[in-house]
Amino acid sequence: MAGRPDPKGLAHAIVISQDFLNDEPFTMYLGDNLLKQGAKPLIDLFEKNQDDCVVAVAKVKEPSRYGIAIFDEKGKIKRFMEKPKQPVSDLALIGVYVFNNRVFDAVKRIKPSWRGELEITDAVQVLLENGAKVEVQTVQGWWKDTGRPEDLLEANQLVLQELQPLNEGLLEENASTTGAVRIGRDTIVRSRTEIRGPVAIGQRCEIGPNSYIGPHTSIGNDVIIRNSEVENSIVMDGAHIDCGKRIVDSLIGSKANITSSEKNLPRGMKLILGDLTYVSV
């Protein structure tokens, strides 16, 4: 788009944001990450120890997919490396950082990596090499990189495990809920519909009639689900499902429309649908 710089890596995002940030400390939190602890413990450490940078790390099974932190024999941070082909550490940088204004000079010193990007890992390495106070915090509790559909569904399960039941909607006669179910305002659960938690349903939805919402399902606002079964799935705002079928392990985008001329319930379907999608099954 005219007037917008081409994306050239995470460190480039800092370069083009300097005027907006006005040399003040800031947190960089990648949008596809989900942490149970959130970013506050890193910010607290940053402020307490007056650091120049705090980096969040976690143990991972595939460190070659991430930037990694390498420590010496005494447990002191020695080096940061971006997506090494042969990792020597399983502690990955998970995409949450706290910086002060020293990072602005660091990002101007680095060059594009073998991927052609200005890597945030290289910028943190420059800070480390130039005497900045860089601390590493291992995240507590679960952490998920939600870059793939299966990761997003697993993250949804983790969040729903802590769901507290609350019904702000209306259940018609012969509609039922079991387990932890959260129903938003102005949502109607029609007759002959069962919801089995953990399930979160947004506002102004219409669920049923003749439907089943199974465990580990999150439903956005203004969603209509009729004559269908949905389980272990994420349904975004404004979606419309009336297909007479069982949908499992699926991501349904905003205002997606799933319909069918056959209203029976055969084996489950797995769908990854983008926004404004129309599917007839």
Image: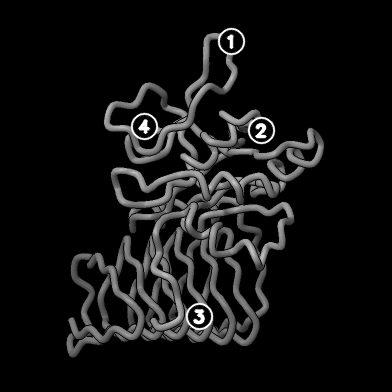
Quadrant assignment, res 241:
bottom left
Residue 74: give its label: 1
Task: Characterize the local packing of mark 4: few (<14), some (14-19) or many (20 or more) Cα atoms within 10 angstroms.
Answer: few
The residue beneath circle 3 is 174
| Residue occupying image coordinates x 71% and y 62% | 22
Residue 18 visible to the viewer: yes
Q: What kind of residue is marked 1?
A: Lys
Q: How far apart are marks 1 and 4 (CA)?
A: 24 Å
Observer-side mark, 1 or 3, equals 1
Question: What is the total number of numbered labels drawn onto the structure image?
Answer: 4
Left or right, 210 with respect to 108, comes to left
Observer-side mark, 1 or 4, equals 1
Tell me the element at label 4.
Answer: loop
- Asked if the residues shown at circle 1 and circle 4 are in contact, with their CB atoms under 8 angstroms apart, the answer is no
Q: Is residue 17 above or below residue 2?
A: above
Residue 156 rendering spot, x and y as whole percentages: 47, 57
Residue 258 rendering spot, x and y as whole percentages: 28, 83
| Residue occupying image coordinates x 29% and y 83% | 277
Q: How far apart are marks 2 and 1 (CA)?
A: 19 Å
Mark 2 or mark 1: which comes first in sequence? 1
- Asked if the residues shown at circle 2 and circle 1 are in contact, with their CB atoms under 8 angstroms apart, the answer is no
Observer-side mark, 3 or 2, equals 2
The residue beneath circle 4 is 61
Residue furthest to the bottom in view is 261
The residue beneath circle 2 is 132
- Asked if the residues shown at circle 1 and circle 3 are in contact, with their CB atoms under 8 angstroms apart, the answer is no
| Residue occupying image coordinates x 32% and y 35% | 64
